Amino acid sequence: MSNFISDDMVEKSLNYLRDNAEELGHLKGRVEYYQHERKVVRGQAFLDSEEKTAAAREAEAESCAAYRHSIEELADAVTVFTTLQTKMKAAEIKLETWRSLNARSGRGHI
């Protein structure tokens, strides 16, 4: 067994992946919801606009407070989701490294 990654570190990584899987799924759902909501808010603001041209209606829709708020919510959700996803990927890499090192040491390569 390698001193590079201890059994305790492996156990913590496995627990981290297990303990955060549901939250990651929840966050993914929030991201998808906010992506859809942003389009709905923009579309409704476009329809509600009293501007004459489509370009002016679009500009008004994209500058309204509700649309900007929906973009902020989406950005926040993506940030939290991506952070957790990256941490989980790091735990997976640690496990793969441990597995690889153990396989090599078992064959006498290390």
Image: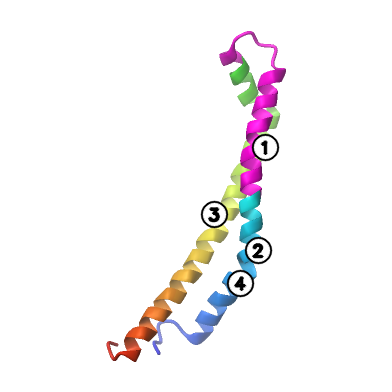
Horizontal relation, residue 93 to residue 45: left or right: left
Q: Secondary structure at mark 1?
A: helix
Q: Secondary structure at mark 3?
A: helix
On whether residue 44 falls in the magenta region, the answer is: yes
Would you name the residue on which mark 4 appears?
18
Q: Look at discs 2 and 3 and give the one toward the viewer.
A: 2
Quadrant containing the C terminus is bottom left
Which residue corresponds to the image point at 47% horizontal and 85% vertical from the top-left? 6
Quadrant containing the N terminus is bottom left
Would you name the residue on which mark 2 appears?
22
Where is residue 5, by image quadrant? bottom left
On whether residue 40 falls in the magenta region, the answer is: yes
Q: Secondary structure at mark 2?
A: helix
In 3D space, how far apart are the residues under numbered discs 2 and 4 (Cα atoms)? 8 Å
Would you name the residue on which mark 3 appears?
82
Q: Position of residue 69 (x, y in %)?
A: 67, 35
Where is residue 46, by image quadrant? top right
Would you name the residue on which mark 1 appears?
37
Mark closer to the chain start, 2 or 3: 2
Mark closer to the chain start, 1 or 2: 2
Amino acid at circle 4: Arg
Q: Look at discs 1 and 3 and give the one toward the viewer.
A: 1
In 3D space, how far apart are the residues under numbered discs 1 and 3 (Cα atoms)? 19 Å
Q: Are marks 2 and 3 in contact (CB under 8 Å)?
A: no
Amino acid at circle 1: Glu
Amino acid at circle 3: Thr
Where are the magenta residues, as a range? 30-56
